Each structure stands twice: as C-alpha cells, then as structure tokens.
C-alpha cells in the first residue's frame, strides 16, 4: 500500500489510499464502538500543534474512514478522512487522524473535527448502525413541491422595464420605463359621482340618435360587487379593477398599543417643541480628547463642520424638514453617523475597513432600487392613513415634518425621524414617528 500512496512518506494509511483499501472488512455497525463525547473533540482540538502522528499498534484500535464533500465546489472530489480511536474507560480517545486536505496532515483540520462531532451525534442518539444513503428511488418524488423562495407577483402598473446591463455597471442615464399615472381629478369628484347622476347621464346618451355602444352595457341598477382601486371603487369586471387594483391599502383595523385617557379634550398644537430636547446653553462638545491627538487639521475640520451649539441645532432641524429633497440635509449626512448606520459601527470589533467607510460617508444612489422606491412612495400614504385614523379617535392629534436632529454634546451623531407626533391623549404628548413599508409580504 505504501507504494501507491503519493500523499505522504511516513504514514502508511492515509488519504484516499486508506479509504479505498480492501484489506479490512469495513462495515457501518456501531454496536461495539466506544462512546465519543464532546470532551473527546475538545481534547483533540486542544492538540492542534501536533504535526506528525506517531506509529501506533493496531491491537485494540477502532478505524474510521469518511468522505467530506466541499460546500462550495460540489463537483470536485471530496476530502478523504482517516481516524484511529482507542477505548479508554468506555470512552473513545483519538489516537491518530488524517485528512487529504492541505491542512489535514496533522489531523486537526475542520473536516476531522466535523467527523468527530458526527460520531458524537451517533453516540448521543445511541445509533447502532450508520444510516445508509437513501437512493432517489427510495424517496418520494419532489417535483410537485414548489421552491421555497418564489417570485412575488406585482400589479401590472407597478412593473418596471429596464436593461439589466445598465443595472450591473451602474451607467444608467435615464429612468426605467415605468407607470407615471396619477389621479388628475379634482378633490370634489375624486370620491366619485353619485350613482343617480351617472344614470341620468346614461339616459341622456340613450336618447341620442346614435347612442354610444357603452351605454347599452350600463344597467339601471348599481352593481353590488365592487373592487378597490387606487382611484376608488369600480364595478367588478371593469378594466381598472385589474390594472389599478390597490394592493397597498391596509385591510386591518387600526389599534393603539397603549392605554389612553377616558376623556380627551380637543387641544390644538400649532408648533412642535424644539429638537433635540433636554439641552441648555452650556451643553457643548468636549474637545479635550481631540486636542490630545496633536493633529491641528483634524481639530479644525471637526470644529468647522461638526461642532454645533444649541441655537444652530434647533435651526438645522427646522431647515432640513424636506429631508432627501434638501441639499443641506444631504450635506450634513456626509459628516455624521446617522441612525441607519450607527448600529454596525457600534457593534464592529475590528478596525473599520475602507469599504465600510466608503459605504457610510459616500453612499451609492439607491433611488432606482425597487424596494427603496416602494418605501419612499408609500411613506406618505402610510403617514396620511395613520394621521386620519388617529384624528378620528383623538381630537387635536397632529403630525409635523421632522429634520435632522443633532445633539451639541454628540455632534458626530444625527437622526432624522419620519415625523413628529403630538398626541394630547398620551401622558407624554410629544413623540416621534417612524414608518416602515415592507416591499415583500
């Protein structure tokens, strides 16, 4: 066997030559196999510095061979593993291990450790024989089972058409072809005309010398079934019921998540309190630690672009209520950590990489991403529905626009809520609004 083994010099049994050897009667039984515990795996892992396995006697040992398939390259040959165990007080101890991978000469690679964990699983489950590989003819057919991740359907008017090549290279110069339909009706007729007026017009059309064809399709009774569209309710079967069906309108009843007062008075709020709250004229950023770095350029940049006082903080929040449509709002985001990226910065243990800093301070234009455009388009709709529902329950309820809030003590941080809420029925009448519009259900 040593003559056909090209993977080592001193080892006689290892790698593929050990796996395909036929001089031993291999079997899948585990009836006389010693118990393998987690301690066996940890002890063998602790000996990771071991490079060369010594020769052992074959008397009283247990031999294991296995194949470990690669997770990424499934078409290539698997790694061949060999393992020699000896029994010690009714428990197994690793005597020698080997793997055909590049790091498996000492037997301390991940493939050997995975084999030990697999044997430990067999021992814990008290399996007497290794389960045989189930053939495709022994398993039920699975062609009728749909795949887990399916493509969600979209309304016809919500689809976009664009060349995939421009999305990959980021060289798109024009917006994709998409529906730009909007409701151009006046607010007086946006809710629809009374049915009596519609039928009067139908009667007038029928009295003409040559009535239009669609007048014969209208009946003298209002249809009992209607479909909800973005332009209001239309009769079932109409083209608008298919092309402009409103999939985004919530069909759940609005409920509040906290107990309200039994009696609510109509308290009007003409203006919101200044944000951020809880600061005074003495609140400022401490430059002591920054001056200890002895970098005048860094200190001057921090003082000119980031440090802010109380009055400027209040004024900045009021000037940037347009958020993404405000150039100043976009400029302020270049110098600060915002609420959307502060979490990954705080939880990062290693030094931030260049790609991470680029993604934070030089973000890409994601306005053409369908999920983001969906969130921006539905945000105002969700805010309007929320305000109307709350105003029906709480007189005086109001929502104000919000800009970027920067605390003078922590000027390198910034947050922009989706709105500011005034609720006279709550113990704390002032609050913040955050809206999430999931793209997938």
Image: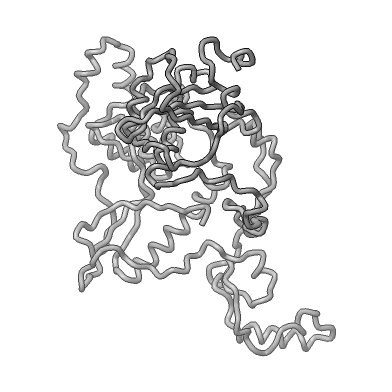
| Position of residue 75 in the picture relative to residue 103 (left or right) | right
Q: Residue at (48%, 53%) from the top-left corner? A: 438
Q: Residue at x 66, y 57 (%)?
A: 141
Residue with the most extreme front position: 59
Position of 214 with respect to 181 (left or right) is right
Picture quadrant of residue 216:
bottom right
**Can residue 168 be seen by looking at this rendering?**
yes
The front one of 379 and 71 is 71
Q: Is residue 104 above or below residue 205?
A: above
Q: Quadrant of the N terminus?
A: top right
Vertical order, 432 against 254 (above or below):
above
Q: Is residue 362 visible?
A: no
Which colour assignment does the render follow? one colour
Question: Total marks drawn?
Answer: 0
How far from the left and from the top, in percent, is residue 134? 60, 48
Residue at the image position 58 percent from the left and 42 percent from the top: 368
- Give the residue displayed 29% in from the left and 65% down from the top: 396
Q: Position of residue 294 (x, y in %)?
A: 26, 9
How far across and down, in percent of the image, does residue 414 sit? 33, 36
Q: In the picture provided, is 166 more to the left or to the right than 354?
A: right
In this view, the residue in front, 356 or 214, is 356
Q: Is residue 57 left or right of residue 170?
A: left
Nearest the viewer among 25 and 260 is 25
Which is nearer the eye, 146 or 359? 146
Among the 4 quarters of the image, the one containing residue 88: top left
Q: Is residue 235 above or below residue 113?
A: below
Q: Position of residue 250 (x, y in %)?
A: 47, 65
Q: Is residue 437 above or below residue 49?
A: below
Q: Residue furthest right?
A: 210
């Amino acid at each position: 066997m040593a003559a056909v083994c090209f993977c080592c010099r001193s080892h006689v049994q290892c790698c593929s030559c050990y796996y395909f050897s036929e001089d031993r009667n291999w079997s899948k039984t585990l009836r006389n196999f010693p118990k393998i515990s987690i301690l066996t795996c940890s002890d063998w892992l602790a000996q990771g510095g071991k490079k060369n396995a010594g020769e052992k006697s074959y008397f009283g040992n247990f031999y294991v061979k296995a194949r470990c398939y690669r997770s990424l390259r499934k078409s290539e040959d698997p790694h061949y593993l060999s393992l020699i165990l000896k029994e010690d007080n009714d428990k197994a101890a690793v005597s020698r291990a080997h793997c055909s991978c590049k790091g498996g000469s000492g037997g301390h690679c991940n493939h050997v450790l995975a084999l030990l964990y697999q044997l430990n699983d067999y021992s814990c489950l008290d399996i007497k024989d290794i389960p045989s590989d189930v053939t495709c003819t022994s398993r039920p057919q699975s062609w009728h089972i749909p795949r887990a991740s399916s493509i969600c359907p979209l309304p016809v008017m919500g689809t976009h058409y664009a060349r995939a090549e421009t999305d990959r290279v980021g060289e798109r110069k024009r917006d994709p072809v998409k529906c730009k339909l909007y409701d151009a009706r006046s607010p007086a007729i946006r809710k629809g005309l009374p049915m009596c007026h519609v039928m009067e017009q139908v009667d007038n059309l029928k009295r003409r010398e040559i009535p239009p064809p669609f007048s014969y399709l209208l009946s003298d009774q209002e249809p009992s079934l209607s479909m909800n569209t973005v332009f209001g309710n239309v009769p079932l079967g109409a083209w608008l019921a298919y092309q402009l069906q409103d999939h985004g309108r919530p069909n759940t009843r609005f409920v509040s998540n906290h107990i309200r007062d039994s009696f609510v008075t109509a308290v009007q709020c003409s203006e919101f309190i200044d944000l951020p709250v809880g600061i005074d004229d003495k609140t400022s950023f401490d430059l002591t630690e920054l001056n200890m770095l002895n970098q005048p350029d860094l200190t001057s940049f921090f003082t000119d672009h980031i440090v802010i006082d109380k009055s400027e903080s209040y004024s900045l929040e009021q000037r940037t209520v347009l958020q993404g449509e405000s150039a100043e709002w976009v400029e302020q985001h270049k110098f600060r950590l915002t609420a959307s990226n502060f979490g990954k910065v705080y939880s990062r243990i290693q030094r931030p990489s260049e790609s991470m800093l680029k993604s934070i301070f030089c973000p890409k234009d994601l306005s053409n991403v369908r999920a983001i455009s969906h969130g921006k388009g539905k945000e105002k709709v969700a805010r309007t529905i929320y305000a109307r529902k709350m105003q029906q329950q709480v007189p005086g309820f109001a929502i104000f626009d919000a800009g970027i809030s920067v605390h003078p003590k922590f000027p390198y941080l910034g947050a922009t809520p989706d709105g500011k809420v005034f609720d006279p029925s709550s113990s704390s009448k002032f609050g913040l609004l955050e809206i999430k519009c999931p793209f997938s259900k």
